[in-house]
Image (cartoon, grey):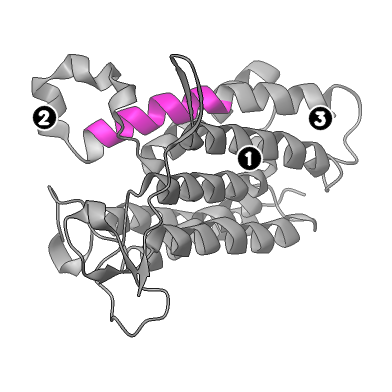
């Protein structure tokens, strides 16, 4: 068995200013988005758009800013509504206490979608073109976030067979039994593997909406699998049909992504 290395969550202390590793992983995610978004400009159809329709680095930068706002607002509201609605209804001001933790990927996704709708409307672009542009640039940010989870020693996995070579003891979980390092599983599946598959897929010509649809199906599937190894939230536990809240939230992503891909395929739009 392995022991969790007890990494100091503070990367650098400058007097009263503490720079946390988790914050640095967010900066890494934003930097990767900017770099990948610039490279995405060379993929079809973005590499052959002309005039006002052409994408520029400024578009990538504006998308990043609006996406950051969407992630923070949507992620926080999603956590409050999906995971602890009764608590936050009775303590509404604590919704704004983001420094205490509590973010939801699925809420963040909805926030990003809203930001992309705003970007598409204000720039007079096709919303499907916008989501197709963004989708391949997202998984590396998810990977960075999972590294942050591991450094913080949070979101650990379920109990594992002690014979598993990478089974790990997380003392902060309140138990000295070995667990799955589910943060690393999610880093590998939702982050690196999804990025490679989606980046390769996005380099070819597809009907508008199909790249984003593959992201929804891919993330939903990989997250659904990873949830079997991740410890469910203590205040929720396992829900109906033996599935966690994370898995239930993935179901509409997978179904919606498949429906979106088929709908895009049947559209008579190049």
Dot 1 or dot 3, earlier in sequence:
3
Q: Which residue is mark 3?
A: 55
Give coordinates of residue 9: x percent, y percent.
Answer: 42, 38
Magenta stretch holds residue 76: yes
Nearest to viewer (mark 1 / mark 3): 3
Element type where label 1 sits in the image:
helix
Residue 195 percent across, percent down from the top left: 64, 57
**Circle 2 crowding by C-alpha within 10 Å: few under 14, some 14–19, many from 20:** few
Circle nearer the viewer, 3 or 2: 2
Mark 2 and 1 residues: CB-CB less than 8 Å, in contact? no
- Residue at image mark 2: 87
Q: Is residue 169 left or right of residue 69?
A: left
Labels 3 and 2 touching (C-beta < 8 A): no
Where 50 sits versus 47, above or below?
A: above
Q: Alpha carbon of mark 1 to alpha carbon of mark 3: how far?
A: 14 Å
Q: Are marks 1 and 3 in contact (CB under 8 Å)?
A: no
Q: Is residue 217 visible?
A: yes
**Quadrant position of the N terminus in the picture:** bottom left
Marks 3 and 2, the one that precedes in the sequence: 3
Residue range highlighted in magenta: 67-80
Q: In the orientation shown, which residue stands out farthest toward the front? A: 15
Q: Secondary structure at mark 3?
A: loop
Q: In the displayed structure, does residue 45 sit left or right of residue 65? A: right
Disc number placed over residue 128 in the picture, else none = 1
Cα gap from disc 3 to disc 2, whole angstroms = 44 Å
Instruction: Give the total of numbered labels.
Output: 3
Cα distance, mark 2 to mark 1? 37 Å
The reply to whether residue 127 is in sight is no
Give the percent coordinates (x, y) of residue 45: 82, 45
Outermost residue, bottom side: 163
Q: Report the residue at 74% width, 42% height from top.
A: 36
Q: In the rendered image of this protein, does residue 250 appear above or below residue 135?
A: below
């Amino acid at each position: 068995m392995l022991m969790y290395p007890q990494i100091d969550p503070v990367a650098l202390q400058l007097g009263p200013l503490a720079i946390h590793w988790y914050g640095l992983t967010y900066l890494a995610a934003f930097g990767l988005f900017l770099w990948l978004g610039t490279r995405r400009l060379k993929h079809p159809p973005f590499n052959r758009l002309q005039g006002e329709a052409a994408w520029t680095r400024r578009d990538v930068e504006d998308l990043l800013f609006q996406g950051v706002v969407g992630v923070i607002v949507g992620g926080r509201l999603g956590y409050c509504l999906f995971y602890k609605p009764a608590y936050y209804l009775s303590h509404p001001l604590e919704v704004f206490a983001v420094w205490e933790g509590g973010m939801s990927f699925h809420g963040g996704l909805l926030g990003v979608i809203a930001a992309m709708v705003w970007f598409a409307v204000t720039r007079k672009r096709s919303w499907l073109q916008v989501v197709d542009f963004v989708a391949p640039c997202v998984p590396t940010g998810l990977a960075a976030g999972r590294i942050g989870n591991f450094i913080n020693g949070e979101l650990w996995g379920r109990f594992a067979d002690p014979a598993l070579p990478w089974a790990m003891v997380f003392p902060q979980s309140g138990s000295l039994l070995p667990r799955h390092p589910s943060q690393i599983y999610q880093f590998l599946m939702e982050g690196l593997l999804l990025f490679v598959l989606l980046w390769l897929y996005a380099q070819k010509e597809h009907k508008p909406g199909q790249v984003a649809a593959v992201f929804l199906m891919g993330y939903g599937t990989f997250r659904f699998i990873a949830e079997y190894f991740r410890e469910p939230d203590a205040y929720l536990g396992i829900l109906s049909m033996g599935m966690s809240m994370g898995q239930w939230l993935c179901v509409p992503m997978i179904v919606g992504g498949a429906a979106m891909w088929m709908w895009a395929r049947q559209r008579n739009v190049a």
